[in-house]
Structures are given as structure tokens and as C-alpha cells.
Amino acid sequence: MARQAEQVARELLQDELPRRWEHVQGVARRAAMASPLFSVDDADLLVAAALLHDIGYVDRLSTARFHPLDGARYLRAQGFPRRLCALVAHHSCAYREAELRGLTADLAEWVDEASDLRDVLWWADMTTTPNGKPTNIDDRIEEIQKRYGPEDLVTFFIRQAKPELVGAVVRTEERLQAAGIGYTAK
């Protein structure tokens, strides 16, 4: 599945959103680093979700103007597994932003599995810069706030979501450490 996900993400992002393509490749590298924590099938799913989590930013896919939801809907239409669609729909505490956008009912189509795998996806996203380089959660949240500005809904969302995002990062880093998996956090 990860191979197919990479092809889809490349086709959608590489030319239209090259910086976003760099980011998802970096997120996928982080996910792959953590993949020994999971079964072969779940590791493949994790890397696929990492590669596809931001495809909803592509203009032609955007119907709700909320990238997690738009990405999940596109993937469903393409026949991807429901669990993958749900991981994309709920990546990085998306339910908080959905509430602010009035899209909670739309997002409810997919269940947030609230699992270790989901935490690792959030960790990989929230510890990767827009250019695909490793970072730490605090610097990433600060970067998002600066990029969007103090009055933007995304800035409000990220401040609201910070405790849950930090929790996922801490849990994941504890699991990585316990498993003897080294990682870079900037």
C-alpha cells in the first residue's frame, strides 16, 4: 500500500505543491523509522498514511476546504482502505479544527482509532518541518502559528490542540526509546 500511496502523493503534490511534497516525504521517513513498533501490515499502513495525509491541500481535491476531510474523501473515491482514509481524516488532531470550521458531522464519517499507530502518525507530522526536516513539537507548533498569523483559525486550532499533540508525541517518543529506536528531534 505504501508504494501505491507514494505514487499517488507524488502525482498530486510534486508539481503543484512541491514544499508539501517535501513535507510528506519527511513525515514518511519518520513513520518508516517508527515502523518496527508495528506488524508489517500496520507499518505499511502507517507509511501510506504519512505519504497521503496532506493530499487534501491540492486545489482540485478541495470541496470542504478542510484538507484532512478532502484527502479522506478523495482516497475513499479511489478505493483506498477505510482505515487509511480515517487516519488521513483524523491526522494531527483534526477534529479540533473541524469543530472550528463547523465540519464535525462531516468528519464523523470516519472514526479516530486513537491508537499507538495514530499517535505515531501525529508524531511524524508534528516533528517534521514544511521542508521535510526533523524538528521538535514546540518548534513545529511555533512555526505553524507564525506561518498562519495570530488571527487565523489554524493558529487558534493549533493552540487548542497542543496538549493532545504533545501527548501523542511524548507517548510515541517513549515507545521509540523503550524499543531502542533512535530518532532525531532537532
Image (spheres, rainbow, N blue to C red):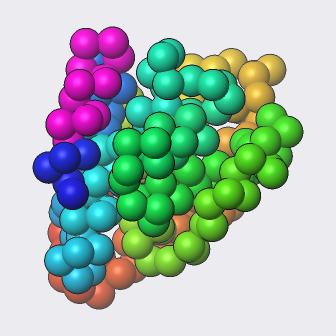
- Residue in view at x 57 percent, y 61 percent: 166
Q: Position of residue 71 (x, y in %)?
A: 49, 38
- Please, is residue 81 above or below residue 61 in the view? below
**38 within the magenta span:** no
Q: Position of residue 119 (x, y in %)?
A: 47, 68
Q: Position of residue 148 (x, y in %)?
A: 63, 21
**9 within the magenta span:** yes
- Residue in view at x 26 percent, y 80 percent: 38
- Please, is residue 84 above or below residue 127 in the view? below
Of the pair 22 and 105, the residue shown nearer to us: 105
- Please, is residue 76 above or below residue 87 in the view? above
Prevalent SS, magenta region? helix
- Please, is residue 32 above or below residue 23 in the view? below
- Residue in view at x 85 percent, y 39 percent: 102
- Residue in view at x 48 percent, y 17 percent: 60
Left or right of 69, for residue 157: right
Q: Quadrant of the N terminus?
A: bottom left
Residue with the most extreme bottom position: 178
Range covered by the magenta-colored residues: 6-17
Residue with the most extreme top position: 16
Residue 29 at least partly seen: no
Left or right of 155, for residue 52: left
Left or right of 119, for residue 177: left
